Structure formats: C-alpha cells, structure tokens
Image (spheres, rainbow, N blue to C red):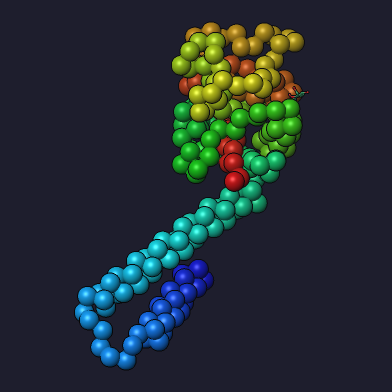
Amino acid sequence: MAFRSACLILCLLNLAQITIQQSNSKPRQKPTNSKKDVVTMQIIDEIKKQINDIAHDVNLLKEQQALQTICFKGFKVQNKCFLPFSQAKTYHEANNDCMAQGGILSTPENGDENDSLYEYMRKILGSEKEVWIGINDMANEGTWVDMSGSSISFKNWETEITTQPDGGKQENCAALSGVANGKWFDKKCRNELPFICQFVIV
Ligand SMILES: *[C@@H]1O[C@H](CO)[C@@H](O)[C@H](O)[C@H]1NC(C)=O
Ligand SMILES: [Ca+2]
C-alpha cells in the first residue's frame, strides 16, 4: 500500500536524520556507555512515538475513506450518509447490521433529514415500503428515545388518519411509512422490514 511505503520511508528518513544529528553533535572521543544508552533510548522512544502518530493518521484516513465509499454508494445529507438495505429484518437484526458497519439505524433529527430520508427511501426501495428508524420505547413504555437512549426532540408520527404511536407495550419500535408519506408508525420489533443505516461523517 502507498501509505505503508510512505510511512516506512518517513521512518527511515527520520532514523537517518537522527543518526546524523547524533554523530555530528558528538565529540570525537568515545562517549561513556551510560550517555550512549540514554541517547539510544531517546531515539527509540522518538521513533516509537512517530510510528504511533503515523498509525493513528492512517487509521483516521481509512475511516474517512470508508465513509466516503458509503457516501458514494448511498446518499449524503448534511453530515450524515444514508445507506439502504432492502432485505427485511427484525429491528435488532437491522440495527446489528448497521452497527457491524460502523453505523446505526437511520434517525431523522429534523425536518430536512426527515424529508431526505423519505425521498431516498421512496426512490431506492419503493414508495409502498416501510423502513425501521432508530427510535424505540423498549426501555420505558411511551418514552421514545434514539439508539443512544436520549429522548428525541424531533417527531413525525402519523396523527391525521390514525393516532400513532398506538401499539402500547406491543409495539416498541418505530418505522417510517412510504404509504403515509414519510410519517412514523410504532410496530412490533420482531416484524421484518427493510432499513436504512446512517453513518455520521466527522
Ligand atoms: C418532515 O418533517 C417536516 C417538519 O416537521 C414536515 O414539514 C414534513 O412534511 C415531513 N416530511 C415527511 C416526508 O414526513
Ligand atoms: Ca410502545
């Protein structure tokens, strides 16, 4: 990989530089052993630190690249990427699939995200479909929270024709409905629906 060879070259250059500095700064006569040991340790520590820094940068770049790949396949809205999965799964299976890729079930947090998610779902999965969203009241009936357990401020329940959420303790997971033009319904968590994962871009 290009990164790895760049890293290796950098490390070798640094090593060469430090060695030159060391030999330049040293007096001609033989230094005592203890001094030499201290200098050697310092060089090793410095190189270790630099390798750690480079490894850290490489990991960050890999993460960014992975997110960009997802964005490329999916749909970007503000600082989020949405990626659809058409295979119907239970709520838990769906969220596990999202988490396995570094995301969570999509969670619209404002009107714009809500519109984007609905439009995207309609286009990719079909306007008759429903998708899981990352909102549930499993822990505490009637208290709807996001996947981090925080209470939600944006809500988009269907209330014109029905009065969602209306499933009580039987229905603790939320889905966005294409038929209801993007409004939300509570559903049984073990139902199987397609889903859209969201990835936050840092
Ligand atoms: C999304 O939310 C906004 C703000 O509440 C609302 O105006 C809009 O109709 C909603 N869109 C959908 C598709 O439900
Ligand atoms: Ca409930």
Residue extending furthest toward the left:
33
Looking at this view, is 136 or 42 the one in front? 42
Looking at this view, is 148 or 157 the one in front? 148
Q: Residue at x 50, y 24 (%)?
A: 149
Quarter of the figure with residue 124: top right
Q: Residue at x 50, y 73 (%)?
A: 6
When the figure is inspected, residue 59 is found, relative to residue 92, above or below; the finding is below
Q: Residue at x 58, y 50 (%)?
A: 67
When the figure is inspected, residue 164 is found, relative to residue 189, above or below; the finding is above
Q: Residue 75 at x, y = what percent?
A: 68, 43
Label count reads 0
In the rendered structure, the answer to whether residue 157 lies left or right of residue 189 reads right
When the figure is inspected, residue 108 is found, relative to residue 198, above or below; the finding is above
Q: Residue at x 38, y 68 (%)?
A: 46
When the figure is inspected, residue 190 is found, relative to residue 3, above or below; the finding is above
Quarter of the figure with residue 183: top right
Looking at this view, is 83 or 141 the one in front? 141
Q: Residue 2 at x, y = what percent?
A: 52, 71
Looking at this view, is 92 or 13 the one in front? 13
Q: Residue 3 at x, y = what percent?
A: 50, 68
